[in-house]
Image: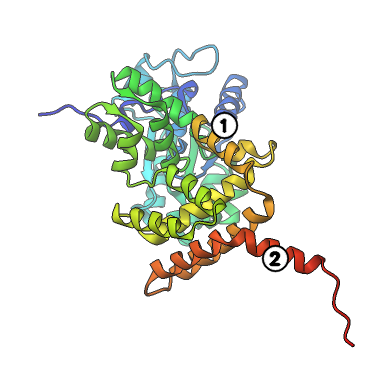
Amino acid sequence: MSNYIVSARKYRPGTFASVVGQAHVTNTLKSAILLDQLAHAFLFSGPRGVGKTTCARILAKAINCLNREADGEPCNECDSCRSYNEGKSFNIHELDAASNNSVDDIRNLVEQTRYVPANGNKSVYIIDEVHMLSAQAFNAFLKTLEEPPAHVLFILATTEKHKILPTILSRVQKFDFRRIKVDDIATHLEYISQEENVKFEYAALQQIALKADGALRDALSLYDQLVSYTGSDVTFAKVLENLNILDYEYYFKAIELMQQENHSGLLLLLDEIIANGFEAKDFAVGLTEHFRNLLICQDPQTLKLLETSDQVRAQYQRQCQESDASFLLNAFHLCSEAEQQTKYATHPRLIIELLLIKLAHLRQAIHVSAVAAASPEKKNP
């Protein structure tokens, strides 16, 4: 029987230092441990797959670690750390509020908090997806959360902080986790590839990171999928093929055809894209984002907002110099309108074809409009 373990589990961080992209949280937690100034309850909130539960587990281990490192990290070697890593700890408890969200579930948890841990410093209760608790369950939890026994610490995790009662929020120390940057995810995937002897193109790893939209767990799942598909040779072309992503080159070519006012070429390009298995509306969505990226590249101060590979960024910089802001803004507006129209259209391809014809002659329309606005009005006789 295979002993294969997915990357999200195999490379789950075991120390604060190995957590990707959340230094503002991990540094604060380590400082609180070293100063012995830990709150009695924490709330970790943020998008999915960014390390909330992982940080909660590391914090729980560090609190109960018998040989804690000088910088506040858990040693992962003492009896307490090993017992938790092996799933045998009696001091660290995890509750999934999505399936244990009733008043009785919370009452059982409150009852458990009365028991002092046999060994270790504290009994730590990690409640995942805490926003799923019912209003009655929240109310039953209030008093214990505000004044828990001295040996108890609560860590609440949620993806939907706005659904939590204000009375709960006022009783916890809040940490907001961020979407992880593309380069941070790509660097982590590079490390895993080197550990697993997987050949890769860095641009391919960046594309996986872009597709994951800031969630490391999603990126690791996509990475495992790509490794299986490519046979441990992850290339940019294979990533585009497997994840059904339209190549950037189509958008750059589309802009070139617009600059040439070649609407026939644009229609043929759309036909090629559809023949390759993509929807016309998907092309419109990508084209809208492409114009947004070109607008960003026109100002060096906003260039950092462009999350892509260095090679593609250089292409954006070259192309944005060939287009003025007026054309890009009007094109962006037209694409946004067409994108909305395709949601309710019976034949979305016709809408996108009309969009491309308009974009092909947009420069001329802008010029005519500018000339008309500048010319003096004719006086009536």
Mark toward the start of the polypeptide (1 vs 2): 1
What amino acid does circle 1 point to?
Val
| Percent x, y of residue 313 | 54, 35
The extreme front residue here reads 381
Q: Residue at the spot x=67%, y=49% of the render?
A: 324
Q: Nearer the viewer, mark 1 or mark 2?
A: 2
Element on which disc 2 rests: helix
Q: Is residue 158 visible?
A: no
Residue nearest the observer in this picture, 342 or 132 = 342
| Percent x, y of residue 160 | 50, 52
Q: Quadrant of residue 319?
A: top right
| Percent x, y of residue 288 | 52, 55
| Percent x, y of residue 302 | 66, 40
What amino acid does circle 2 point to?
Val
Element on which disc 1 rests: helix
Q: From the viewer's perspective, is 372 left or right of 230?
A: right
The extreme bottom residue here reads 381
Residue identifier under label 1: 25
Q: Is residue 296 visible?
A: yes
Residue nearest the observer in this picture, 277 or 378 = 378
Q: CA distance from mark 1 to mark 2?
A: 55 Å
Q: Residue 228, relative to residue 100: is it above or below?
A: above
Residue nearest the observer in this picture, 323 or 146 = 323
Residue identifier under label 2: 368
